[in-house]
Image (tube, rainbow, N blue to C red):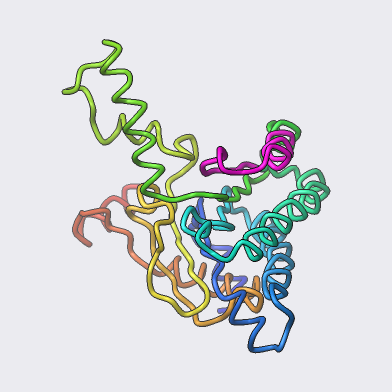
């Protein structure tokens, strides 16, 4: 059975998250100028967005710049900020064409005012689109995300709006980034590393993990399609036994 046939009959992941790794190594391997691997990586996103919206994926979240990336050389950080600005400008026609909602997660306080304004404007202009949501994580860290959610609950306890014993996993989950979207079903990392690098820690608690040696600029919709076909074959038990899952599936 072809990959397209498998996907047509499969339960698709609702939310795919991608750690886009390998830009610098791609640049070095191809003797590109400093930072040009990141430029190539920016261009790799477009066909993935097109593929996901046409396949029926509801949310695609990509890790563009982590909270730890601020430690990189200032020249590289400046280039990345410039590329993020270009990416937002370039994605807007695609968002309008496909009616994709564009959102951003992360600590915006460290970003320039002009970039913050551009992000807010893009979010406002696409807020009503419902074909898919593209989420770009900028200055984001999973530990920051959880701590930020805990801080909001702590403030409510301090203000007397909430009792400490009322704090639960479900309640905390309402305050992390993307609380209003489906949990991450499928987490992909390119570039050959086997870690999730502080990305969507809470949201990916039960995500199926996929690692590939392919450097991000070389990652294609065809490779993602193969991963989705593999995802469709995996049994997701969420702590239950295989037998319980089969019985539940038969019940539906």
Image quarter of residue 214? bottom right
Is residue 119 shown in magenta?
yes
User: Residue extending furthest top?
Assistant: 160
Q: Which residues are magenta?
A: 103-121
Instruction: Classify residue 51 as left or right of residue 168.
Output: right
Image quadrant for the N terminus?
A: bottom right
**Residue at (46% x, 39% y) in the render:** 177
Q: In this rendering, is residue 93 above or below 4?
A: above
User: Residue extending furthest front?
Assistant: 74
Q: Position of residue 202 (x, y in %)?
A: 35, 47
Image quarter of residue 194? bottom left
**Residue at (39% x, 36% y) in the render:** 148
Instruction: Classify residue 50 as left or right of residue 137.
Output: right
User: Residue extending furthest left?
Assistant: 165
Q: Position of residue 150 (x, y in %)?
A: 32, 33
**Residue at (38% x, 58% y) in the render:** 207
Q: How many marks?
A: 0
Q: In this rendering, is residue 105 above or below 171?
A: below
Q: Which one is nearer the viewer's eye here, 153 or 93?
A: 153
Q: In this rendering, is residue 47 above or below 53?
A: below
Q: Position of residue 149 (x, y in %)?
A: 37, 34
Question: Which SS does the magenta portion mostly show?
Answer: helix
Q: Position of residue 119 (x, y in %)?
A: 69, 40
Is residue 74 shown in magenta?
no
**Residue at (73% x, 56% y) in the render:** 82
Q: Which one is nearer the viewer's eye here, 65 or 164?
A: 65
């Amino acid at each position: 059975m072809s990959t397209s046939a498998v996907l047509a009959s499969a339960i698709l992941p609702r939310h795919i998250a991608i750690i886009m790794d390998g830009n610098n190594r791609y640049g070095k391997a191809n003797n590109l100028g400093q930072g040009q691997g990141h430029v190539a990586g920016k261009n790799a996103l477009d066909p993935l967005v097109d593929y996901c919206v046409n396949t029926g994926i509801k949310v695609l979240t990509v890790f563009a710049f982590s909270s730890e990336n601020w430690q990189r050389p200032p020249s590289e950080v400046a280039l990345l900020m410039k590329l993020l600005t270009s990416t937002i400008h370039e994605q807007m026609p695609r968002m309008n064409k496909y009616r994709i909602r564009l959102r951003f997660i992360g600590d915006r306080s460290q970003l320039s005012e002009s970039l913050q304004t551009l992000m807010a404007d893009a979010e406002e202009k696409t807020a009503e689109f419902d074909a898919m949501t593209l989420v770009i994580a900028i200055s984001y860290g999973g530990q920051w995300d959880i701590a930020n959610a805990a801080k909001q609950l702590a403030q409510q306890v301090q203000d007397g709006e909430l009792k400490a014993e009322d704090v639960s996993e479900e309640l905390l989950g309402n305050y992390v980034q993307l609380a209003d979207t489906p949990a991450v079903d499928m987490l992909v990392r390119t570039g050959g590393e086997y870690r999730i690098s502080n990305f969507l820690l809470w949201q990916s608690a039960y995500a199926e993990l996929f690692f590939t040696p392919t450097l991000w600029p070389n990652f294609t919709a065809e490779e993602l399609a193969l991963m989705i076909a593999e995802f469709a074959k995996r049994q997701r038990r969420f702590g239950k036994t295989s037998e319980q899952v089969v019985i539940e599936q038969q019940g539906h």
